[in-house]
Amino acid sequence: MKIIEKRLAGIKRIIAVSGGKGGVGKSLTASVLALTLSRLGHRVGLLDLDLSAPSLHVILGIEGLYPKEEKGIIPPEVHGVEFMSIVYFIEDLIGDVNKLLESDFAASVKEIALKIY
Ligand SMILES: Nc1ncnc2c1ncn2[C@@H]1O[C@H](COP(=O)(O)OP(=O)(O)O)[C@@H](O)[C@H]1O
Ligand SMILES: [Mg+2]
């Protein structure tokens, strides 16, 4: 089994928060949803898949928290939620959509998205 499939198999439910345009509240909805589910006692991961304008790290007020590398990547925990975002890896590419779309991260995101939908 490929590694992404194996990891996804361990997740009970995936909730995709998406929308056809910017500024409609996707990021806020995703953040509040993750924090609420965590508070209700669920184990929650929050993955920011916004490649052009990631903002979940800002909404959650994350500063100085980074993923650890140990046989893969261990996401930091923020308010009880395991959090991962493109900003940890290619901050210098944000804003340059063409470069971003050619990155390894974008390839992985595409693979995850295709498996989820
Ligand atoms: N339910 C809401 N009521 C009022 N303002 C909101 C609501 N949801 C989001 N906003 C505000 O609207 C703006 C865009 O929200 P955001 O979640 O970043 O949208 P998106 O991720 O879809 O681009 C932000 O300034 C946010 O604070
Ligand atoms: Mg957003």
Image (cartoon, rainbow, N blue to C red):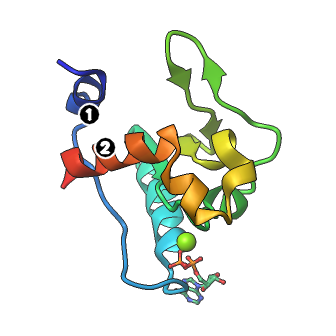
Q: Name the spot of residue 61 as percent of width and height, x first.
A: 75, 56
Q: Residues within 10 Å of mark 2 (few under 14, many from 20)?
A: some
Count the numbered circles shown: 2
Q: Residue at x 53, y 62 (%)?
A: 31
Number of the front mark, 1 or 2: 2
Q: Which residue is mark 1?
A: 8
Looking at the image, residue 60 lies above or below residue 66: below
Q: Quadrant of the C terminus?
A: bottom left
Q: Is residue 72 above or below residue 100?
A: above
Is tag 1's residue or tag 2's residue first in the polypeptide sequence?
Answer: 1
Give the camera-side residue of 92 and 116.
Answer: 92
Amino acid on which disc 2 is placed? Ile
Disc 2 marks which residue? 112
Q: Residue 71, percent across and down?
A: 50, 10
Q: Nearer the viewer, residue 25 or 104?
A: 104
Task: Mark yes or no: residue 41 visible.
Answer: no
Q: What residue do we see at 31% from left, 43% from top?
A: 112
Q: Residue at x 47, y 49 (%)?
A: 47
Taking 40 as reference, is 8 left or right? Answer: left
Question: Is the CB of the residue bearing disc 2 within 8 angstroms of ligand 2?
Answer: no
Front in this rendered view, residue 59 or 54: 54
- Disc 2 is placed on an element classified as helix
Q: Residue furthest top?
A: 71
The kind of secondary structure element at disc 1 is helix
Contact flag, marks 1 and 2 (Cβ < 8 Å)? yes
Estimate how packed mark 1 is, as few (under 14), some (14 to 19) or many (20 or more) residues with alpha carbons within 10 Å. some
Q: Amino acid at mark 1?
A: Leu
Residue 95, compared with residue 62, is above or below; it is below
Q: Is residue 51 visible?
A: yes
Quick one: quadrant of the N terminus? top left
Q: Position of residue 72 (x, y in %)?
A: 50, 17
